[in-house]
Amino acid sequence: MAFMCTDSGNLMAIAQQVIAQQQQQHQRQQQEQFHQIQSSTASASWAPPPDHQSAFASAFSDPFSFPPPQSFKLSDEFDSDEWMDSLIGSGDLSPLFADPPLSTDLDRLIMPRGDVLTVDQLPQPVKRDKEPEPEPEPDPDPEPNSKVTVSCSSSQSLPSSSSSHPVLKSLLDCARLAGPNPDLAIKTLDQTRPLVSKLGDPIQRVGFYFTEALSVRLMSTTSPPPPSSSSSEEFTLCYKTLNDACPYSKFAHLTANQAILEATESATHIHINDFGVMQGIQWAAFLQALATRPGGKPTRVRISGIPSPSLGSSPIRPLSATGNRLREFAELLELNFEFIPIVTPVDQLTVSDFRVDVDECIAVNFMLDLYHLLDDSMERVQYVLRVAKSLNPEVVTLGEYEANLNRVGFVNRFANALSYYCSVFESIEPAMARDSLERVEVERVLFGNRILRAVGLAEGIERTDRMEESGEWMAQMEKSGFKSVQFSNYAISQAKVLLWNYDYSAKYSLVDSTSGFLSLAWDGKKLLTVSSWR
């Protein structure tokens, strides 16, 4: 079984590793040749230098051996500062819990030399007429006086019943009053403000952002909230900080990649259709695994990238940057690689938009993407799943957040969101000190706006941050004709080793359900779930 690099969120570390291995191989070859010349008159025997593949294999012979990124050194031809600056300047890294600004600074992006994608070469969107379909009414809110509880993971400062915590109780009271009695809700919210702080404990901090969201909902119902003041550089730096501190993206990428790797184990032509691609960091680790595959490298690897909505209405240039970075990285691995951007709007895609050859092994990847299409009808989700099914994929990987923030009334949605983000904020605490300014920025930039979009805006199309739990995703996948595929024991063991190796808090755990879902949980509460289908 080929090894999957666990730090799939660190493209630099992977590139450093590959370059270091190539340098070592080159040095060994020179030494071999030198010794051969010295001994040519004394012996007629000669041993060929190790080939490229065996050099990679020796470096990854132990699937549970994770070399630290800091041990790698770069060659003179590879400028790590330039590459990292280009990523930061482009805002092209994808924060796991936030959508980056729609406008990105691409002027500072360093494009690789040689064969590059240009805007003119990219296919243009094909607009098709689509008749709107009626949407069912969402579930009504509970009565103002009905009891709604919120469950936060326990900590030393909390009682066993977290719903009795003053901050949570006050916020839930405000949410119940927001509809029938907004004036009283505002007064209750004013009494809550002294109890919350973005510098306090996890509940005080999550309470701060929910207080701000409720304030927007109550005070600015007729006007949109002010735009985020965060720059693309801030998003990128906050994403990197969160990725270093918490296992969210590493777990999601590693688990999905392993499922695809196993499904394409003997394929010579591999074609991945990635719905929601941004910077392509997930595929760097996958390409490295293919380069070290025991059965040999595939003849061709093709990735078709459907842009994430986070790239905005003009995704051509960031898609071009992603394709060029992956192509340059594949060249280091000596892989025959092709990146195909698809810029047709996702809810207008048809099979004809995909270039699929008969000899290809098809994989489809939905990594934290389908939730963008959630609405009360689920029709857009079903449309995209039907398109994916028509590609006849060997494997489909799905990664989604584990919370019910879609087709529920406001009060229940507020309680669900409060419970979810309470666990998220608590999971950050062990890795980032309470007085850490980096933590403050991570929570403000990555979580604050998402909380606002989930519970702070008016109902309907303005409420853009929706989630569904794994049970609903199972229903949608099965409705589209997919069948669940259990993760292999190796894939599950690899995810467990990820948590052990990076010395994360013992409160992180994996929940492996009989239905084939593998979830990353904090203190028993599921936060992120990955599944495999065919």
Image (cartoon, rainbow, N blue to C red):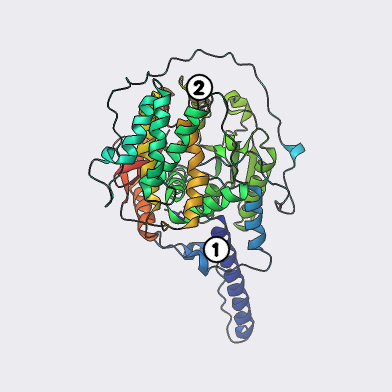
Which residue occupies the extreme left position in the image?
160
Q: Label 2, label 1: how many angstroms apart (C-alpha)? A: 48 Å
- The answer to whether residue 119 is left or right of residue 66 is right
Percent x, y of residue 173: 34, 30
Earlier residue among tags 2 and 1: 1
Residue picked out by circle 2: 460
In this rendering, the answer to whether 109 lies above or below 384 is below
Look at discs 2 and 1 and give the one toward the viewer.
Answer: 2
Q: Is residue 368 visible?
A: no
Residue 153 lies in quadrant: top left
**Quadrant housing the C terminus:** top left
Percent x, y of residue 302: 60, 42
Front-most of 198 and 373? Answer: 198
SS under mark 2: loop
* Type of amino acid at the residue the image marks with label 1: Gln
Residue picked out by circle 1: 17
Which residue occupies the extreme bottom position in the image?
42
Q: Is residue 349 visible?
A: yes
* Type of amino acid at the residue the image marks with label 2: Gly
Callout 2 touching callout 1 (CB < 8 Å): no
Percent x, y of residue 60: 46, 62
Badge 1, how many Cα within 10 Å: few under 14, some, many 20+? many
SS under mark 1: helix
Front-most of 293 and 471? Answer: 471
The disc placed on residue 402 is none
The count of marks equals 2
Percent x, y of residue 50: 55, 68
- The answer to whether residue 141 is left or right of residue 37 is left
In this rendering, the answer to whether 199 lies above or below 352 is below
Badge 2, how many Cα within 10 Å: few under 14, some, many 20+? few
